[in-house]
């Protein structure tokens, strides 16, 4: 979607398999590309600049998931408009004309960086808005975009639990190529992918190990929890002890797109094939580790 297209009937889209036949769910919270005209008009930035925060094409990279029996939920509105990978009211009071309610989180690190639920800046650190907003506008976006996304995501997780006793959620993202760690001393190449599991708190290590091994065997340079250990989704939904495992996957944009023009590169097809193969490996792994991934309940003595 783009600025010129009509308002989507829903703020999200769930790409459903013929049957949800595996305990996997995929989510793409930041690949949305519908920019409401009134939002664009409120910003001094042009559309190309607003899109610098977008995880372009990530939903397409993972679009093969339904073929393996796993749903993919994707947000259709962009991160610059509202970030669904935040608390619902993670807001910067300096952005608003009126006082925020007491329940708003105004002091998080993300708010301080300008990247709250309603972001203040895009990835280039340019200010999004010409003027301050009213809290009513934030509330409207939260009700219209944020809550439907999380209702859908929570519903898919609950469905997986009901059918399989366990759910593995892969939270799919991209990252800019600048500012990333290098592979080793003297090696100028940056990391290709970052796996975030909140240092083991949101996902069983066997899942993270399996994904890292698979990607490394495909010659991708992988690191864990540096510089991204996971966001709201991993923190809020990740509960390995009760059978919900959430792993965040960040993909270096330079692998598949021109970061200046936002156009796909020839390497896009290769990467998509590898991501599709990764989905297949996750399906295999879910079967191999099924018993170990389910909640481990202690019997009474």
Image (cartoon, rainbow, N blue to C red):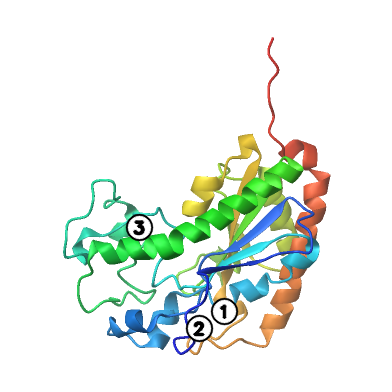
The mark that comes first in sequence, 2 or 1, is 1
Crowd tier of the residue under label 1, counting other residues whose Cα lies within 10 Å: few below 14, some 14–19, many 20 or above: some
Question: Vertically, is 139 above or below 258?
Answer: above
Locate residue 114: give its quadrant: bottom left
Residue 146: tell me if it is visible: yes
Residue topped by disc 3: 110
Asked if residue 246 is positioned above or below residue 222 in the image, the reply reads: above
Disc nearer the start of the sequence (3/1): 3
> Comparing marks 3 and 1, which lies closer to the viewer?
3
- Is 288 on the left-hand or right-hand side of 204? right
Q: Secondary structure at mark 3?
A: helix
Q: Which residue is mark 2?
A: 259
Judging depth in this view, the residue of 36 and 215 nearest the camera is: 36
At x 55%, y 41%, the residue is 201
Residue shown at the point (53%, 73%) measured from the top left? 31
Residue 232 pos. (x, y %) = 46, 52
| Callout in the foreground (3, 2) | 3
Residue 43 figure quarter: bottom left
Viewer-nearest residue: 153 or 43: 153
Image x and y of residue 25, in percent: 67, 56
Which residue position holds label 1? 254
Mark drawn on residue 160: none
State yes or no: discs 2 and 1 in contact (Cβ < 8 Å): yes
User: From the viewer's perspective, is 236 left or right of 209?
Assistant: left
Mark earlier in primary sequence (3, 2): 3
Q: Is residue 259 above or below residue 99?
A: below
Circle 2 sits in a helix, a strand or a loop, which is it? loop
């Amino acid at each position: 979607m783009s600025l010129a297209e009509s308002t989507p009937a829903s703020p999200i889209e769930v790409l459903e398999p013929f049957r949800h036949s595996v305990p996997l769910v995929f989510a793409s919270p930041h690949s949305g590309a519908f920019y409401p005209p009134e939002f664009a008009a409120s910003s001094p930035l042009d559309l190309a600049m607003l899109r610098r925060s977008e995880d372009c094409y990530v939903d397409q990279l993972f679009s093969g998931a339904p073929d393996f029996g796993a749903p993919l939920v994707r947000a259709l509105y962009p991160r610059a408009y509202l970030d669904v990978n935040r608390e619902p009211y993670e807001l910067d009071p300096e952005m608003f004309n009126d006082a925020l309610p007491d329940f708003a989180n105004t002091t998080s690190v993300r708010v301080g960086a300008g990247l709250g639920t309603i972001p203040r800046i895009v990835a280039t650190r340019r200010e999004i808005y010409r003027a301050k907003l009213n809290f009513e506008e934030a509330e409207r976006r939260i009700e219209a975009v944020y809550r439907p996304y999380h209702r859908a995501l929570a519903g898919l997780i609950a469905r997986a639990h009901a059918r399989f006793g366990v759910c593995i959620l892969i939270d799919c993202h991209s990252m800019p190529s600048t500012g990333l760690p290098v592979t080793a001393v003297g090696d100028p190449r940056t990391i290709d992918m970052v796996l975030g599991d909140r240092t083991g708190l949101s996902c069983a290590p066997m899942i993270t190990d399996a994904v890292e091994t698979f990607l490394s065997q495909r010659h991708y340079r992988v690191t864990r929890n540096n510089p991204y250990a996971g966001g709201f989704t991993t923190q809020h939904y990740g509960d390995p002890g009760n059978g919900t495992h959430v792993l965040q996957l960040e993909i270096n944009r330079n692998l598949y797109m021109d970061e200046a023009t936002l156009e796909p590169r020839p390497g896009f097809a290769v990467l998509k094939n590898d991501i599709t193969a990764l989905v297949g490996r996750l399906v295999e792994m879910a079967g191999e580790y099924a018993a170990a991934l389910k909640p481990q309940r202690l019997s009474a003595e």
